[in-house]
Image (spheres, rainbow, N blue to C red):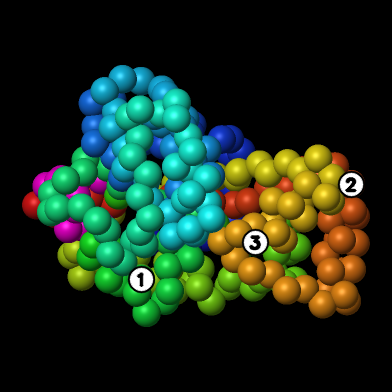
Amino acid sequence: MEITKNNITRTCPESEIYNELLKLDDKHILELGCGNAELTRTIATEGHGRTIVATEVDKIQHNNNLLITDLPNVTFKLAGAEKIPAKNNTFDVVFMFKSFHHVPIKLMGQALMEVQRVLKPNGIAYISEPIFAGDFNAILSLFHDEKEVRQQAFLTIKNSVDTGIFSLISETFFNLSLVFEDFTDFENKVLKSTHTEHNLSDTVYKQVKELFVKQKTGKFTIPIRVDLLQVIS
């Protein structure tokens, strides 16, 4: 397994990746850390026969998700990956979209054991993680350096394969595009996000704004690694 890869050339929406790797029709799906449910909606409304449980630890975002009324095949729950509110052998697929590194380091191993527990025999875990590189990361790391937690996330996933909790099906690397209308849009979506409290000093705020404006287009890329894991039955 590799934490990163040089010269990642493919840039595409994440939906293109998981649709290539997985067949989701008629599957019972768990999404851990669903955020604003953007990908939840995409998965729920494409194909057929899909039922989804989508969890979130941010209470503010979870309460917003509960206001969604047009996704009858989705159930929203307030829960973390380290304690999944589901019985053993429940789901065909578990998704974690850029959320595993947000699990507290001391609970990462427990979270993967929980994922294994709730997956059916031969069930699949799809875990995508941002790589510590790229122009967006250069801005983010000025006020929220995730190098250590991303490394620990990778090592925990690798350990789960090395110890036989999961088998590795594949690793896929791609670039995800991120577009902001302007710095105000960036500030609202990133600096004021409810899942993480960012308290920037005036100096750091100025550095962040200068680096954002220097990019000019508001378009950034995030290199992503997808680890596709399977429960060893």
Could you classify mark 2 by the number of other residues whose Cα lies within 10 Å: few (under 14), some (14-19), or many (20 or more)? few
The first of marks 3 and 2 along the sequence is 3
Where residue 85 sits, quadrant-wise, is bottom left
Where residue 203 appears, as percent x and y from the top left, is 88, 76
Task: Give the left or right position of residue 215, taking residue 25 as reference.
Answer: right
**Which residue position is annotated with label 3?**
133
Separation of marks 1 and 2 at Cα, in angstroms: 37 Å
| Quadrant, the N terminus | bottom left
Could you classify mark 1 by the number of other residues whose Cα lies within 10 Å: few (under 14), some (14-19), or many (20 or more)? many
Q: Residue at x 73, y 41 (%)?
A: 179
**Which residue position is annotated with label 1?**
108
Above/below status of 55 relative to 110: above
Separation of marks 3 and 1 at Cα, in angstroms: 22 Å
Q: Residue at x 84, y 69 (%)?
A: 205
Q: Nearer the viewer, residue 210 or 197?
A: 197
Above/below status of 42 relative to 175: above
Above/below status of 218 relative to 161: above
The first of marks 3 and 1 along the sequence is 1
Q: Hey, what amino acid is under mark 2?
A: Lys
Where residue 115 appears, as percent x and y from the top left, is 25, 57
Q: Nearer the viewer, residue 168 or 53?
A: 53
**Which mark lies nearer to you, 3 or 2?**
2
Could you classify mark 3 by the number of other residues whose Cα lies within 10 Å: few (under 14), some (14-19), or many (20 or more)? some
Residue range (magenta): 115-124
**Which residue position is annotated with label 2?**
216
Q: Residue at x 70, y 64 (%)?
A: 140
In the rendered image, residue 121 lying in the magenta stretch gets the answer yes
Where residue 76 sits, quadrant-wise, is top left
Q: Hey, what amino acid is under mark 3?
A: Ala
Asked if the residue at tag 2 contacts the one at tag 3, i.e. Cβ–Cβ closer than 8 Å, the answer is no
Task: Give the left or right position of residue 52, taking residue 89 as reference.
Answer: right
